[in-house]
Image: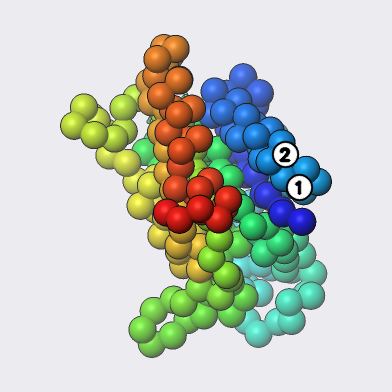
Amino acid sequence: MKNILFLQCSPHGETSLGTQVAREVIERLRDAYPGVSVVVRDLAAEPLAPIAGDYAMAITGSRAFDDPAFSCSETLIAELERCDFLLVGTPMHNFTVPAALKLWIDYVLRIGRTFAGTPEGKVGLLKDRPALVLVRSGGVCTGPFARQPDFLTPYLRHALATIGIADTDFHYLEGVAPDAGQLAAFRRSVAASRALRSFHGESV
Ligand SMILES: Cc1cc2nc3c(=O)[nH]c(=O)nc-3n(C[C@H](O)[C@H](O)[C@H](O)COP(=O)(O)O)c2cc1C
């Protein structure tokens, strides 16, 4: 059975256009793979607890994975390990990922658990799998008309690659109020995305 993990990061919930398109992706996958399991981790509606001292101490110590300090981290990592397809719906907040998603990263990137520290640098310990990232921004953040830096894409790409998820595919819906043409183009680019083709086993 196929498993999908959806990280919902918009504080706008169901009114978020990014979330709406992500949900359409999930519906199409449900049609294509009856019985598919979908875990929705709504990082905006149910925010993770800020990183506390115990966790900060634990990640640099040699505690067992079942230590209570790791319980949130282990839950999130297990959700990720189980999935065959990672779907992230995220707004851009101040040129990068929203704080809600940053916290997820802080719990999931764990030395000795999801990546190994080596003399050559960090090496991911999770298996690669397609990851589709739908980015919503109020301004333009890609291409020649961008008037702001995009730290979201390189940062999230690097964070996921650090733990072994190198197959990341980013798609953007830009502007405060995208018109019907922009929304249709976004839907088309998502439907034809490398991540979805890879998940379907098509050559990419
Ligand atoms: C705290 C905050 C910071 C934001 N920072 C940016 C930004 O740096 N660049 C940008 O283009 N839009 C920025 N926006 C606008 C959001 O990206 C925009 O509202 C987007 O449409 C939200 O998508 P959503 O409806 O899926 O949540 C920001 C919004 C908030 C609430």
Disc 1 marks which amino acid? Val
Q: Is residue 12 above or below residue 162?
A: above
Residue 144 or residue 101, whichever sits in front: 144
Q: Is residue 171 left or right of residue 70?
A: left
Question: Is residue 12 visible in this depiction of the protein?
Answer: no
Q: Relative to 6, is 183 above or below?
A: above
Quick one: label 1, few (<14), some, or many (20+) residues within 10 Å?
some
Q: Looking at the picture, how far across and down is residue 26, in whole percent?
A: 66, 37
Hey, what amino acid is under mark 2?
A: Arg
Q: Residue drawn at (51%, 63%), measured in percent from left and top?
A: 165
Identify the residue position indicated by label 2 in the image.
30
Instruction: Tell me where residue 105 appears, x and y as whole percent.
Output: 55, 56
Quadrant field for ligand 1: top left
Name the residue carrying label 1: 36
Judge by depth and name the residue closer to the eye, 23 or 101: 23
Farthest-out residue, bottom: 119
Q: Are marks 2 and 1 in contact (CB under 8 Å)?
A: yes
Say whether disc 2 or disc 1 marks the residue closer to the N-terminus: 2
> What secondary structure is marked by label 2?
helix
